[in-house]
Image (spheres, helix red, strand yellow):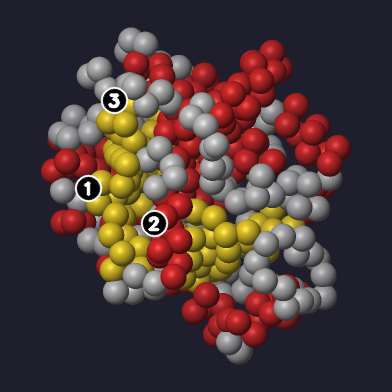
Amino acid sequence: MADKIIVSGVGCCLVDLLFTNIDFRGNKIHPYLSKKRGDGGLIPGHLVFQEEFEKYSGGSFELALNKITGGRTYENINIGGPSIVSLINLAQLADKEYCEVRFYGRGGNDELGQYLLASLKKTPVKMKDFKLINNRTPCTVVLSDPSFDSYHGERIFLNSIGAAWNYYPNELNDEFFDSDITIFGGTALVPRIHDNMTSLLKKAKSKGCTTVVNTVFDFRNEKENPSTKWPLGESEESYGYIDLLITDKEEALRLSGKQDTRNAIRFFINKKVSSLIITNGTNNISTYSDGRFFNISGLREMPISQKISDQLKNVQAGDTTGCGDNFVGGVMASIVNQLHYGVNRPDLQEACCWGIVSGGFACFYLGGTYFEENSGEKLKRIKPYYESYKKQI
């Protein structure tokens, strides 16, 4: 590996508008809850497009949101999105002396776009090809219920794709594919990239890149046909070009078309995914590696951090916005660190340790992105949880 490891990411980058303390069992939200898959209604833990939600609710998005929130304005505005949030966490946990993290994407030339651009400049991620274009900035309204799931917390996402519709595969230049690691994050919310994933992954592998895919709920394909598995690119050949697939349980089941985690894992193994991690909220994560990228490892499970879980119960809070994205960033930071120190095949369980504590730590602040006052601040705060977790397992 070169002296400086280059990590390039493309995918979902947007503005999160966070509403906290929304009672998912309350009367205000009840009329807007989903009755069947893909109908445009709200489901805890899932994403729906704002336009489809309007059709379901029978009125304007603003009116429905006003009723659900009791007329409140959002409590927090933040950088969101499975790609950029994970890359920011990676850049905060890895030493910039030996790791450079880059992002490629699009925003809208509007007020939210200006906020997004200014906020991204406060992070360690380099904006290699990020432009504000003549469209709306991608945005997600996040409804958060910290008391849900015995105070572990949960969210509902209402997304508008906006300018992300206008990012095309041919805009990923040669520099992107000259990276050591390429990460495709939440591409279901960047449709042109997502629909061409097979070609993009194949090109990345042909250039010698390590390829990572972390997924997001694919409402577009869920809406089109809720009874069939979600596509990932032009064909299922995509999976054979993935060194590491990170997905949550629901997404794994929908991508594989299977009814349970074990059969979903068998599907991905048969499709030649080199390694995979499946998260499952506050339940154990599942991991697998065939030995091509990570050390060989059969199917294993790992628990969440008990220390973080106990602290969240004590304060009866848990904004889980960005937990999965920060999990990915923690995994990637560990991979980068292991490669920097000369490990030929990284240890998957070690990488997951950093992912688990990174994801859990995200519950202690509002929104997915943590803004550091000083470089190394976040690592210093997370490290005690890592040390505790290593003792736990």
Q: Which residue is mark 2?
A: 117
Percent position (x, y) of residue 29?
Answer: 74, 73
Give 374 or 311, whichever is nearer the viewer.
Answer: 374
Residue at disc 2, secondary structure: helix
- 329 horizontally vs 211: left or right: right
The part of the image, by quadrant, that contains residue 240 is top left
Percent position (x, y) of residue 209?
Answer: 23, 32
Q: Which mark is residue 5?
A: 3
Residue at disc 3, secondary structure: strand
Q: Quadrant of the N terminus?
A: top left
Farthest-out residue, front: 373
Label tally:
3
Instruction: Choose mark 3 or mark 1, whichever is in front.
Output: 3
Question: Label 1 is placed on what type of residue?
Answer: Leu
Q: Is residue 140 above or below residue 246?
A: below
Q: Which mark is residue 52?
A: none
The part of the image, by quadrant, that contains residue 211 is top left
Residue drawn at the location 48% of the way across and 37% of the way down: 89
Question: Label 3 is placed on what type of residue?
Answer: Ile
Q: Which residue is mark 1?
A: 200
Percent position (x, y) of residue 60?
Answer: 58, 87
The part of the image, by quadrant, that contains residue 18 is bottom right
- 121 horizontally vs 173: left or right: right
Marks 1 and 2, how far apart at CA: 26 Å
Percent position (x, y) of residue 323?
Answer: 59, 43
